[in-house]
Image (tube, rainbow, N blue to C red):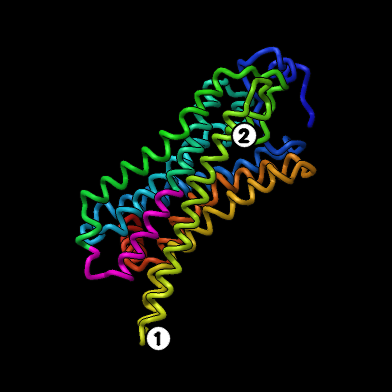
Amino acid sequence: MYLSSRMITSVSPSTNSSFLLTGFSGLEQQYPWFSIPFSSIYAMVLLGNCMVLHVIWTEPSLHQPMFYFLSMLALTDLCMGLSTAYTVLGILWGIIREISLDSCIAQSYFIHGLSFMESSVLLAMAFDRYIAICNPLRYSSILTNSRIIKTGLTIIGRSFFFITPPIIHLKFFNYCHFHILSHSFCLHQDLLHLACSDIRFNSYYALMLVFCILLLDAVLILFSYILILKSVLAVASQEERHKLFQTCISHICAVLVFYIPIISLTMVHRFGKHLSPVAHVLIGNIYILFPPLMNPIIYSVKTQQIHTRMLRLCSQKRY
């Protein structure tokens, strides 16, 4: 990776003041061209999730538990896009190359918190589908508005409270290695690799969070779909089975869109030391942008109520 002497000085191990963000190393001359698709993707993330939120907010018939959880997912995706737009697009537009320690810590807090929040929302949506299919007569009495509000507050607390200790701990580390991040945004594990302090607390705590939130959520989602599958297969009519399966397709796609990039990024960090920096940056951007980009598309195509309202909204805008 080519760095000028000025950049090496600015990110030297003698100071904790700033960190160098990594774009597509060796392809700097192509950044103006790269900025076009990335700017378009961020615009689609912003527009798509705002449209989902607008449709659910303005359409009384969508004021149901399933769509309340979908609005939580859209809001989470919107915030994820906004939390990284400045650094990712800033590099491609030539606006920034460095980020301060405080800003880096804040960005990593929101990225990881929002990732945990998306996982929690997907779990809540799986529970919603389980109740709707396996216990439909009690659906409205179980998923009341007050319980949905409590679930939303619990998701926020679970996502952002437990990551606070390791994120705050980053502030007190001594970063004696060259301050070069491996992505165009800040991640907790990136900062740990640059620290010369004792990082055992952060390493073990982060691993515990992965097991207790991401892995546990994935297991519970899988378990809920085993119960759903068992209930659906007990239905005699094949047409009814198909109809019940269709109500879960959007959620299954959203789960895959979320977990596949996370697994890929984890594998790259763990076993991809031999890969080029460009591969690391590309996988990192997929992890950040793929779910917020795809979820509005998935739900607007696969969910009939959203699809109909989206078409109506677009036709109104046209005329």
Q: Secondary structure at mark 1?
A: helix
What main secondary structure does the magenta stretch of the protein show?
helix
Nearest the viewer among 195 and 47 is: 195
Q: Dot 2, crowdedness within 10 Å: few (<14), some or many (≥20)?
A: some
Residue topped by disc 1 = 238
Identify which residue is drawn at 21% across, 58% down.
Answer: 60
Residue 61 in the image, given as x and y percentages of width and height: 22, 61
Asked if the stretch drawn in magenta spans residue 151, the answer is: no
Judge left or right: residue 134 versus residue 211: left
Residue 187 in the image, given as x and y percentages of width and height: 58, 34
Q: Are marks 1 and 2 in contact (CB under 8 Å)?
A: no
Asked if the stretch drawn in magenta spans residue 129, the answer is: yes
Residues in magenta, as a range: 119-139
Identify which residue is drawn at 38% across, 84% down.
Answer: 239
Q: Dot 1, crowdedness within 10 Å: few (<14), some or many (≥20)?
A: few
Residue topped by disc 2 = 189
Judge left or right: residue 95 versus residue 67: right
Q: CA distance from mark 1 to mark 2?
A: 48 Å
Residue 188: image quadrant is top right
Q: Secondary structure at mark 2?
A: helix
Residue 176 in the image, given as x and y percentages of width and height: 70, 18
Give residue 216's mark.
none
